[in-house]
Image (cartoon, rainbow, N blue to C red):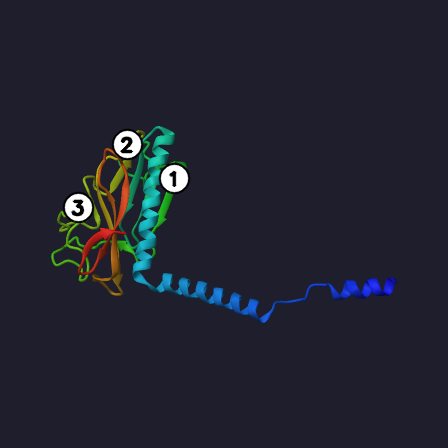
Amino acid sequence: MCQLFRHKALNSAPPAGFTLVELIVVMVIASILATSVVISYTNPTAKVKTAAFSILGDINLARSEAVNRNEDVLVDFTLGARDGYLICRDTNTDKDCNDEAADDVIKEVLFREEVQFYDCMSAPPFPEGGPTKTPAGTTLAGKNGLIFGGPNYIKMQPDGTSSDNGSIIIYHPAPQNPQKVKGDSYGAVISSASTGRIRLMRWHKGKGWSKK
């Protein structure tokens, strides 16, 4: 009787390992994930889009910090070998995050080397394949992708508004040639200072600006 019970128990144990179908499914999923990672790293538009969504999230972060702290929070855009920005409490009201104490800097962001503010300081001519106007339709000449009243900053205020409206335009320059655009450019747009709300726009070659 005991031997019969043990025999049945052994026969009812689940099979070990994976079936062929399960292995195929796992391999297909892994291939899809690997392909998406490769695309995100090699597609210039994907790189710019990722940076644009980060800008969108970080300006909204600055806005919420200003409301929660009940004080002004600055988004200070920096130009250099690698463009980026700082988010900080502007304790000395000089519109500059670079001289703030480390405890007052909320976030520091450097763009990937393949992404930078739209380089049109000496335009025209504008970078080949890129926009000649902002999403609002104003000229880009003499700008560097930071089109608003303040030099290179946006201030978010305790009531949820911003100090200014305007656009932050970024793009992927061709290797060794910043006057040629690879892929599509993106713009983060604050259309109304009274609301401080921000949206993303995308520049399609031959079509112009449109919602992302």
Query: Disc 2 on helix, strand or loop?
Result: loop
Tell me if residue 111 can be seen. Answer: no
- Tell me which label, 2 or 1, sits earlier in the chain: 2
Residue 108 rendering spot, x and y as whole percentages: 36, 45
- Residue displayed at 19% across by 48% down: 135
Residue that badge 2 annotates: 93
Q: CA distance from mark 1 to mark 3?
A: 30 Å
Amino acid type for the residue under numbered disc 2: Thr
- Residue type at mark 1: give it: Ile
Disc number lying in front (2 or 3): 3
* Front-lying residue, 8 or 176: 8
Disc 3 secondary structure class: loop
Q: Give me the residue at 75% from left, 66% from top.
A: 11
Q: CA distance from mark 2 to mark 3?
A: 29 Å
Identified at 33% across, 58% down, the residue is: 47
Q: Residue at x 15, y 58 (%)?
A: 126
Local secondary structure at mark 1: strand
Residue at which label 1 appears: 106
Q: Is residue 196 toward the left or the right of residue 22 in the image? A: left
**Whole-number angstrom distance, CA of label 2 to CA of label 1:** 16 Å
Which part of the image, by quadrant, shows the N terminus?
Answer: bottom right
Q: Is residue 73 left or right of residue 11?
A: left
Whether label 2 touches label 3, CB < 8 Å:
no
Camera-side mark, 1 or 3 = 3
**First reached walking from the N terminus: tag 2 or tag 3:** 2
Q: Between label 2 and label 1, give the one nearer the viewer.
A: 1
Q: Residue furthest right?
A: 1
On screen, residue 207 above or below 25: above
Q: Are marks 1 and 3 in contact (CB under 8 Å)?
A: no
Give the residue pinned by disc 3: 136
